[in-house]
Image: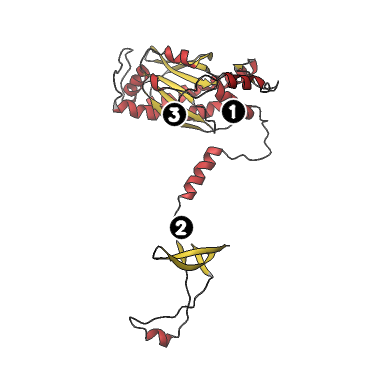
Amino acid sequence: MTKSKSPPSDAATTAAENEPAPASHSLLKKGEPNEILLKTYKKVEKKLAGLLKVHLSNILDCDMGVEVGDSAKLPFQDWLSNQLADSVYLEFQLGASEVPIIIRIARTFLTASVDCFFGGQFDGEMESTGELKKSEIAMIERLANSISVVLADAWSVLFKTTVRFKGYVHDKDEVELETDDDDMLVASASIELFGHTIPAIDVVQTIDGLVAIEPQLNRPNQKTTNEIDPIWKADLKDSVEQVYLPVRSVLGRPTMQLSELSRLAVGDILPVAPTDNVPLIVGDRVFAHGSIGEQNGGVAFKITQFL
């Protein structure tokens, strides 16, 4: 996870003060969400609670109750310093936004999840300590994949997007964010298992992240053009560029009578007329023309024309 930015210098502060104010229709005021933003984000929170219950129940194969509270706006470092219990911190990327969403999962809930997954019943007291066990690490992956789907579905009430799990850390001192605004919206989820309530999950949405996706939130529902998801487009480009294709050049295509062909022997020389228009063939298609020469003691092909 990335490091926090250092406080701005006096010159940077002066420059920021001289920047034009946000447009009046913006969901955000300067560093502070207004009522429109909060009402907009509440739609995501409302859907989040139901989705968490469905998806987590499918993983753990047990009945549970899930209650997600309203988001509280507070500085990120204040929220982080208040985390006294052992937890793991998952990082997710929302669409093309570079500002992540942080999900805190309490170690107690992680332990209970492993216990339920293997058919046990959480007694309200069992909790692992120290380094993460292999079973807990495997459970983190299962939970992260499920939460990715939950976040994408929750945000679909506002716009279609992808959500990617980027990784996790166990030590809260390793949780760092590179943001201009330290304020976060933190929604806490309590989960009830076998009659025991666990303060299990925190969903941390940065103000900077909301600023980044604000143009999409203001986008009209009726779209006149099909939009390509930038993450999917980048992945497709990377995949295509790693495909191997056969490349060959043809120096000559001599013709011979069958009688001449039958008399060929080892050591015979077939004349090839010199040419500066040697084709470079990719698959079955002529890709370019060029000439044959030498480079570093070896035969080389120099491209003179692309087709």
Of residues 26 and 217, the one drawn nearer to the viewer in this rendering: 26
Judging by the rendered image, the residue that carries numbered circle 3 is 146
Mark yes or no: residue 204 visible. Answer: yes
For marks 3 and 1, the one nearer the N-term is 3
Q: Residues within 10 Å of mark 3 (few under 14, many from 20)?
A: some
Residue under the point 48% across and 50% down: 241
Q: Is residue 126 left or right of residue 285?
A: left
Residue under the point 46% across and 15% down: 77
Residue 109, percent across and down? 37, 18
Residue 115 falls in image quadrant:
top left
Q: State the scheme by which the image is colored.
A: secondary structure
Residue 263, percent across and down? 37, 86
For marks 2 and 1, the one nearer the N-term is 1
Q: Secondary structure at mark 2?
A: loop
Q: Is residue 220 left or right of residue 125?
A: right
What amino acid is labelled 3 in the image? Ser
The image's mark for residue 111 is: none
Mark whose residue sits in front, 2 or 3: 2
Judging by the rendered image, the residue that carries numbered circle 1 is 213
For marks 2 and 3, the one nearer the N-term is 3
Q: Residues within 10 Å of mark 1 (few under 14, many from 20)?
A: some
Of residues 14 and 93, the one drawn nearer to the viewer in this rendering: 14
The residue most toward the front is 11
Q: Secondary structure at mark 1?
A: helix
What amino acid is labelled 2 in the image? Leu
In 3D space, how far apart are the residues under numbered discs 2 and 3 (Cα atoms)? 37 Å
Q: Quadrant of the C terminus?
A: bottom right
In 3D space, how far apart are the residues under numbered discs 2 and 1 (Cα atoms)? 39 Å
What amino acid is labelled 1 in the image? Ile
The image's mark for residue 245 is: 2
